[in-house]
Image (tube, helix red, strand yellow):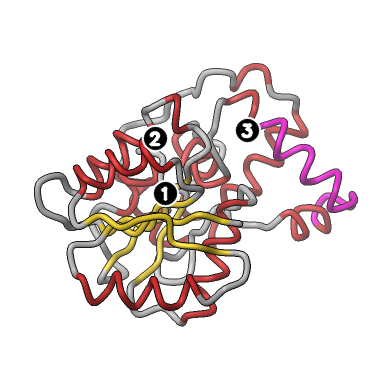
């Protein structure tokens, strides 16, 4: 059973999400929070698998709350999915850097929300819809200059290649086709790369790919 914490200051939004999630046989709502500070406390008490976190909330905003959750080693297994009202949210890239596993716009289709919750539990990054790869690249281009993530020097040439392909948004299946290997082999390369770099999930690997210079925004085509 996937346990979800809802963090949003609008009670109607929380009620809508709860109704949708609780109707699923494999998902349950573990709790709710109306502000970021309560969300952090609830995450520590309830240990949910996923936190659906609104970016703009009182007391403590979603960005600060995400940093608090992802920075807590005892909550390493908790995934945060940010909820935004607009696709071009100025905090998108910063939240990914803070450890968020992805984004959804609040008016997303119900099936997409359910897919997102299940995807992040499996370790996949949710970078679309709503927030496109091109948008991530735009924010990456504005970020502080190239930096070598700790562990980058330990990557093999194939792992660097895989990291670059993850960075431009390819799935494991697409990477497998590009490199002419099996999807399982591609997944293994991605997993090993994440372990070596200490990336929480695929979303952070994307950020590291940009910040290390392995991927340039213009590569998205």
Residues under labels 1 and 3: Cα distance?
Answer: 18 Å
In this view, which residue lies farthest toward the left? 59
Q: Are marks 2 and 1 in contact (CB under 8 Å)?
A: yes
* Magenta span contains residue 186: yes
Residues under labels 2 and 1: Cα distance?
Answer: 8 Å
Does residue 11 lie above or below 205 as drawn?
below
Quarter that holds the C terminus: bottom right
Q: Which mark is residue 80?
A: 1
Quarter that holds the N terminus: bottom right
Say which element carries label 3. Answer: helix
Q: Which mark is residue 31?
A: none
Does residue 79 lie above or below 17 as drawn?
above
Q: In the figure, is residue 99 to the left or right of 10?
A: right
Q: Which residues are magenta?
A: 178-194
Q: Which mark is residue 194?
A: 3
Q: Residues within 10 Å of mark 2 (few under 14, many from 20)?
A: many
Judging by the rendered image, the residue that carries numbered circle 2 is 70
Residue 20: x and y in percent read 45, 77
Residue 19: x and y in percent read 41, 77
* Magenta span contains residue 96: no
Q: Residues within 10 Å of mark 3 (few under 14, many from 20)?
A: some
The tag earlier along the polypeptide, 2 or 1, is 2
Magenta stretch: helix, strand or loop mostly: helix
Does residue 1 lie above or below 192 as drawn?
below
The tag earlier along the polypeptide, 1 or 3, is 1
């Amino acid at each position: 059973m996937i346990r979800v914490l809802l963090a949003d200051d609008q009670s109607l939004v929380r009620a809508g999400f709860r109704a949708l999630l609780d109707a699923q046989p494999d998902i349950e709502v573990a709790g709710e929070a109306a502000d970021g500070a309560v969300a952090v406390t609830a995450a520590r008490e309830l240990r949910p698998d996923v936190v659906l976190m609104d970016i703009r909330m009182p007391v403590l905003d979603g960005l600060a709350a995400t940093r608090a959750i992802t920075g807590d080693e005892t909550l390493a297994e908790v995934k945060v999915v940010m909820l935004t009202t607009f696709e071009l949210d100025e905090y998108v890239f910063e939240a990914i850097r803070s450890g968020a596993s992805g984004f959804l716009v609040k008016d997303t289709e119900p099936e997409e929300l359910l897919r997102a919750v299940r995807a992040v539990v499996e370790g996949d990054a949710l970078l679309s819809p709503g927030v496109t790869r091109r948008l991530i690249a735009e924010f990456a281009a504005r970020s502080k200059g190239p930096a070598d993530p700790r562990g980058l020097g330990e990557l093999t040439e194939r792992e660097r290649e895989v990291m670059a392909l993850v960075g431009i948004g390819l799935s494991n299946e697409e990477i497998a086709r590009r490199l002419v290997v099996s999807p399982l082999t591609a997944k293994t390369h991605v997993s090993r790369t994440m372990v070596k770099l200490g990336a929480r999930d695929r979303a952070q690997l994307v950020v590291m790919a940009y910040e290390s210079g392995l991927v340039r925004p213009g590569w998205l085509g």
